[in-house]
Amino acid sequence: MKTTNPILEQNQHLRTKCLVYTRVMGYHRPVESFNIGKKGEHKQRTHFSEGKC
């Protein structure tokens, strides 16, 4: 069961679709254009953020 965030509910009309791009074979492609298998593979990837030096 998902809990709803009142702030998100209140500002639903302001939200827009966000395209997520990822690098595939040397170029960038939107994740929404992937087939089912590739989307599953993308969800399993480990994401990281670089810290400051």
Image (cartoon, helix red, strand yellow):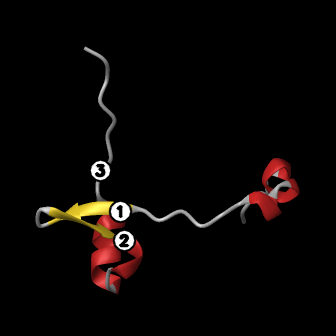
Res 21 label: 1
Q: Amino acid at mark 3?
A: Thr
Res 51 label: none
The picture places residue 9, in percent across and down from the top left corner, at 84, 58
Which label sits in the foreground, 3 or 2? 2
Compared across the picture, whether 13 is left or right of 45 comes to right
Task: Identify the secondary structure beneath mark 3.
Answer: loop
The residue most toward the top is 53
Q: Which badge, 3 or 2, comes first in the chain's sequence? A: 2
Q: Amino acid at mark 2?
A: Val
- The answer to whether 51 is drawn above or below residue 18 in the figure is above
Task: Identify the secondary structure beneath mark 1.
Answer: strand
What residue is shown at x 29% (from left), y 82% (from top)? 37
Q: Which residue is mark 3?
A: 46
What residue is shown at x 72% (from left), y 62% (from top)? 2
What residue is shown at x 31% (from left), y 40% (from top)? 48
- The answer to whether 48 is drawn above or below residue 38 in the figure is above
Front residue of this view, candidates 39 and 29: 29
Location of residue 16 by image quarter: bottom right
Q: Which badge, 1 or 2, comes first in the chain's sequence? A: 1
- Mark 3 and mark 2: span between their CA atoms? 15 Å
